[in-house]
Image (cartoon, rainbow, N blue to C red):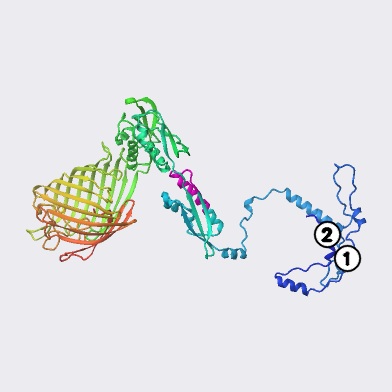
Amino acid sequence: MLVPAAAFAQTIDTHTTPPPVPSEGGDQAQADQQAMPAQPADPKGDQPVIPDSQFDAALPPITDDIEAPLEPIQQNGPLLPVSPLPTATGQANSEQPSVDVEQQDQSIVQEQQAASGELQQPLQPLSTFDTVPLQTVADQENAEKTPQVNYDVVVNGLNAIGLDDQFHDLSALYDGKGKAENGTMVEARAKQDEGLAVRLMRSIGYYDATALSTIEREPNQPGRVRVIVSATPGQLYRLGTIAIDAQPTVPDDLIRNALTLHTGEPIKAAKVEGAEANVSLVLPQQGYPFAKLGTRDIVLDDETYTGDYTLPVDTGPRSSFGAFRLRGKNPVFSEKHIALLARFKPGDLYDVREVDDLRKALVATGLFSTASVRPVKTGEPGPDGTEIADLQVRQVAGPPRTLAATAGYSTGEGFKLEGSWTHRNLFPPEGALILTGTAGSQEQGASATFRRSNAGRRDKTFSLGLALDHNNYDAYDAFTSTLSVRWAYDSTPLWQKKLTYAYGAELVGTNESVYDFDKGERVRRTYGILALPGQVLFDRSDDLLNPTRGYRLKLNLSPETSVQGAVHPYARTMVEATGYYPVMDNLVLAGRARAGSILGIDRNALAPSRRYYGGGGGSVRGYGYQRLGPFDPNGDPIGGRSLNEFSIEARYRFGNYGIVPFLDGGNAYESSMPQFDHLHFGAGIGGRLYTNFGPLRIDVATPLNPRKGDGRIALYISIGQAF
């Protein structure tokens, strides 16, 4: 700011002595000023600072050329006289050296040249600077003293149209839980919730909706405010005319029936998007794999409060299945084997559900890291006026080998560890070699199995196996070798079938200890057994590993011939039923009943390993493994020719955990038909840890009517439910 000469002179005249330096405190400053001694008056204080003659001589000459540059002021001498600094008593120090003006000017020039050189240097990168602001102690104290704003939220106008809960879930104000750092933050949240309220109202048809937020102080509550969000829905808009812009389809009303919108209903965004998604889903299921939906157009009329809806659809050609095209290096499967997995034939009307099913079948083989199936246009005519659409199958092979291990423990069987090595495609296509080993306190063994999956038919399996086992139980001690062949049509984790079956043949050679009642002692005998086992299962449950509703019926029948001194033909049968009833979302009642019978052979002529026994983790819990049924004079179980059992469980689940109280009952009998007397009961409680491969089961049980020699507590640890 420019200061008038008179004022500037007056300022100079009135300040004849330098003002005192203020101290840190106001009171202290006044005290210091009062304590300072008075300065003597300047005798030249009423004279000009610079004489007029000296000032005029310093001015450059002025030319008539107005374009000429101004001449610099020559520094022949200082404009202002340099006086020696006053001492503490106000007098000049006569010993203080005077300032050399020329030396001072030369120093200034050198500093300017040095500064000019620095300006010519390149700028330093921004990343080399410390951009973290300094935080002083005062800043920290002020931050700690900053008052927090508490607020209450009041929402008006949304509850009447059913949006109050949805607003609460998405609101920034509610998300802040009634606290904010300052008022600006509260205001920002309120503005954000204004927009949220408008979007929610428009999403259900209130396109003239407005919202306003206000902030009020709470009376008698310092630091607390009330935020009021007032929503005004306005008039509800409804659908007017509904038009579809598309090529003709078969049938003609295919798209209109799939578009589940009706004139007169509110224009709700979720309903409109759901209807359009249904069109995108239905068209590929009805022969239109290349259908594409355009951008909808809704024209609102603010006089009638209606919206005319138009949906453009490019249906593409109506198509039928063609051939398979393989893509990828070193494809795992040929076109022939892929056709075996497909549930459709060339010429069938295209259905995307069948394509998804084929992709899942490829994934289920476990041989791919990536497998995809997508339609490709051919332009070739197909049956019934369709166009052929080939399927491009992309195969990326994954690791074919797998190592697996399981471990378990139960009273009576002890510890058991099983490991396996599998090569799923050693004999293409899907010819697997499986090597297994078992190490346990009472069971040891090894086996080799060849298995062909999808053998001649999807989900049909052929297997050929050789197994060597040693089982050392109280009932018998057996060294067994088994050669088996089996065909099975089974459920898989991806496709649980209602009806499955299995059949095959077994050739068994076993050397076992058996109690000889004629000799009154245990002896070892060798048995040769030929069996033709078969199984049928009718499954109406909702899950293979952890069912919660439905039932299962299973029948096992195995005609067998035992050779031990003489030929003894007989038949082993077992029927089993299980049911599951959901009492509530997290509580399921599960029950099981089964009965078995061996017909056509005397018990003493039957190999001990082929007899029926009760007790254990998969039977009547609380009793030792195989310890329900007849005993020999030494107190060891000898098994029977019939069996009956039942179990009931209450499976309560909370999150990934569960508690299961249970009651089991049953017995094994010497007769060929099961009896329903002399039942033994066991009860207990179990814990479940639910994983992605099935529940981990830990059960603790006790016998309710124990016999001499039965333990008080039995423990069972395994994977999967008891039944």
Predominant secondary structure in magenta?
A: helix
Mark 2, secondary structure of its residue = helix
The quarter holding residue 292 reads top left
Residue ID for mark 2: 8
Give the answer, above or below, for where 628 lies relative to 395: below
Q: Residue at x 62, y 60 (%)?
A: 134
Badge 2 crowding class, 10 Å Cα cut-off, few under 14, some 14 to 19, many 20 or more, is few
Residue 201 seen in the current view: yes
Residue ID for mark 1: 45
Q: Which one is in front, 395 or 305?
A: 305
Left/right of residue 491 with respect to residue 476 in the rendered view: right
**564 is within the stretch colored magenta:** no
The quarter holding residue 457 reads top left
Q: Which residues are magenta?
A: 189-210
Q: Position of residue 459 (x, y in %)?
A: 27, 40
Q: Position of residue 207 (x, y in %)?
A: 47, 43
Give the answer, above or below, for where 542 lies relative to 655: above
Going by the picture, which residue comes out furthest to the right? 53
Residue 284 seen in the current view: no
Q: Which one is in front, 298 or 512?
A: 298
Which is in the foreground here, disc 2 or disc 1? 2
Q: Earlier in the sequence, mark 2 or mark 1?
A: 2
Q: Which mark is residue 182?
A: none
Q: Position of residue 300 (x, y in %)?
A: 47, 38
The quarter holding residue 433 reads top left
Give amino acid for label 1.
Gly
